Structures are given as structure tokens and as C-alpha cells.
Image: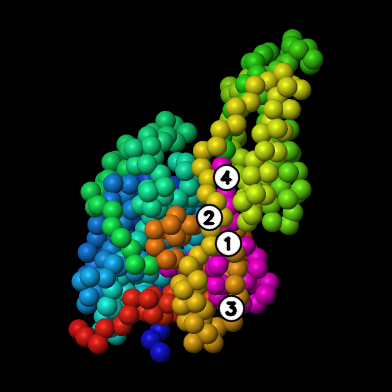
Amino acid sequence: MLTTDAERLWNSLMELARIGATPKGGVRRLALSDEDRRGRDCFRDWCRAAVMQVEIDAIGNIFARRAGTDRDLAPVAIGSHLDSQPSGGKFDGAYGVMAGLELVRTLDDAGVRTRAPLEVVAWTNEEGSRFVPTCMGSGVFAGVHSLEHVLQQRDVDGVTVRDALGRIGYDGTASPHRLGAYFEAHIEQGPILEREARAVGLVTGVLGLRWYDCAWTGQDAHAGPTPMPARRDALRGAARLVEAVHALALRSAPDGRGTVGFVQVAPNSRNVVPGHVRMSVDLRHPDDAALAAMDAELRSAAAAIASELGLECEVREVASFASCRFDAGCVEQVRAAAKAFGYSHLEIVSGAGHDAVYVARVAPTAMVFIPCKDGISHNELESARPEHVEAGANVLLHAVLARAGVSADRR
Ligand code: GLV
Ligand code: MN
Ligand code: MN
């Protein structure tokens, strides 16, 4: 059975991880930054070296195409993202893109042609860390986000997506196109596969997600003379909401998740009672009704805290997707590939969001997970074992071949 070149894939991942490398062994390649550009350039050059045709669309998604033998078939796409969290790991996103490239290199070496074309895709700004929303590129591709709207989004310094894309030279012109299917390989980013000692996860779906920006307004005041009862301290409101988010997620145990990961305090001065705070809230649940209930709890907690502390709080939803189930046929192709190799596997629902969530709206889609060490991700220490990296790529290869069809023509 055809297998990917595990060493070449590992080496490509490690070489890519040198771009934006951080002291503790992770990467920092914020979306549309110089490091992201260098990561993209590296991927584009490797794709061109593999004689793929590279196109960029208006939101900066990179599509590298390997021709098929049947011109009438829509491409089978494989991909993920190259951007990272501020202190991210080497594998989140990069694994799916590099596994896609390795798959093409493997087919080239073996002289295998597929009937459907193949397309290796690097989607723009999956992380949603520098620019909201998450899964920006795949969301635009799938028609979920309007291009004009996302181009106007700003980072904390006020730089727009439009300007950042133009600056790194990835504001392309490729037009939207149909995909025959989409497969994404990714590290699990959680503890289940490792705990269950399985090499591969057959991802059947993804938790629903809602992101919010909460803006607290009180009044700036002097830290000394202002009596405690007279204060309208926006940071107290935010602190109370951090606890409320944690508590409401616990009330939705075991599946509910609630996180505050971003806080901006103004004027952020030691001796000023803060009058303004901006904070994020991230809520997730596999059940859409439960997620809607968490949304209602968040809003009522914010309103109650604001009224008690004499503050204003605006809660604005800035991104969301419903829980998703992947295509049964694609999941079966992943399962068949895992079985053919004799890899231990189990079905799993992803706790993390992925580009596959949006692509699933326009093409039959599935994902392949591999374990990561201690379930740790969005962390410089994120790590995966070479044998799992190899297993996931082999499963991806054979799921894709089953979908794209192997042509009798060789070259
Ligand atoms: C993507 O990294 C997410 O937030 O799930
Ligand atoms: Mn990811
Ligand atoms: Mn991530």
C-alpha cells in the first residue's frame, strides 16, 4: 500500500516551524504578519517545486492545485492553516497543510495520477487571534462571511485585514470555485486519543461556538481620594464576569466550555480606577440548544453585574458557528483508510474549531485527528509523536485517493 514519506513530512514541519520560532519551541505566526507571510511563501515555493499551480483569492487563501485526469471533476481539497496563536505550537494547522503537501509529493514520486484534481489549501486566519472572526478565510470561501465585512476588521492596533493582506502581498484575485470534497488532518488539541491510546481519530463533528466582545464602561477616577462606595470600576465588572463565565460553563458540564482569554484595561494605570475594559468571551457546546442557553446566561450575568456595580456592559456577538456533523461518506473513507493500515482509532467530536466546519457547508468534509502530548495545544509546548504524524498522513492519503479516484494513466 502506498505510504507517505514520514521523514520528509516531519522535516517539512520542523523547517516551517523555524519561521516565527519562539524560545520554548513553539511558533508565533499571527495572521497576516511578516511571519505569516514567510510561512506562506515557504509553502507556496514548496508547492511550485512540486509543480502545482498556486492561486490566491481575495481573502488570501492559498490553493495549490495538482491536475487530475478528468477535467470535469471538482478538486478534492486537503488543508488547514499556517497562522498561529501568539504563543502557539508547531503542529496546530501546519500539520494539515504539510500533510496535504506530503500527499502530493508521495503521489508524484509514485507516478500516481488521480481522476479528480487535488488542491492543497492554506486558509487565512483560522486562529481568530489577531483578527476576528475565527476561520476567516474558509468562512469567506464558504459564503458564510462577506468579504467586504472581514476586510474591514481591525487588530488591536487598528490595522485592517485589507491593509495587512495587501502589505504581505496575499490579496489575490482567484475566483471562488466548487470543491468535490475536503479532508483536514489536525492534532486533536485535547486529551482523548492519548488517554485511549489510539493513533487516529475519525472526527465526526465539531462543537458549536460563540465569541463575544464585552465592553464595560464605568468612570476613570483617582485611586486615592475616590471613596470605595463611589467608584464605578469597569475592571471589577470584568472580573466578576470572568467568574460568571466559568460558572455557567460548569453548569453545562461535562460538555460546556467558557473562556475569557483577552482583556484590555483602560487607561491601564496603577493609580486610576479603570473606567473601560474590553474583554472576549468564548462559549462552546456540542448541543445548539445548550449553547443558546449559555448565551442567555452570559447576557443576564453581564446585565446583573453591571446593574449591581453601577456600570454599563455591552455584549456583542462577533463570531459563531453551530455544532457541525461531517459527511458520513467522507468519515467512512477515513475509517476505511485507518482500518486498512491497522491503526488503532476511535470516533471523536472536536472541541476545537476548524476550517472544516465552514468548508463542510459547501463540500462533503471530514477530518483526521492524531494525538498530541498531554492534550496540550495553543501552547509553545504542543507536541506530537512522529509515528502519529505519519499515521495521520497515511490515512489522509488513502481517504483522498478513495475520494479522488486513482487513474489508470501514470506519468
Ligand atoms: C481554533 O483554534 C479554535 O479556537 O478552536
Ligand atoms: Mn488549528
Ligand atoms: Mn488553533
Task: Report the disc number at residue 345.
Answer: 3
* Image coordinates for residue 109, horizontal then vertical, percent: 28, 82
Question: In the figure, is residue 138 to the left or right of 24?
Answer: left
The kind of residue on which mark 3 rests is: His
The kind of residue on which mark 2 rests is: Gly
Q: Residue at x 40, y 44 (%)?
A: 145
Separation (CA) of disc 4 from disc 1 = 15 Å
Mark 2 CB near ligand 1 (8 Å cut): yes
Separation (CA) of disc 2 from disc 1 = 7 Å
Label 1: few (<14), some or many (≥20) within 10 Å?
many
Task: Report the disc number at residue 210.
Answer: 4
> Of discs 4 and 3, which sits in the foreground?
4
- Residue 396 or 158: which is nearer the viewer? 396
The kind of residue on which mark 1 rests is: Ser
Q: Label 2's element?
A: loop
Mark 1 — residue?
A: 350
Mark 2 — residue?
A: 353
Tell me if residue 212 comes above or below residue 137 in the rendering: above
Which of the 4 image quarters holds residue 64? bottom left
Residue 90 visible from this viewpoint: no
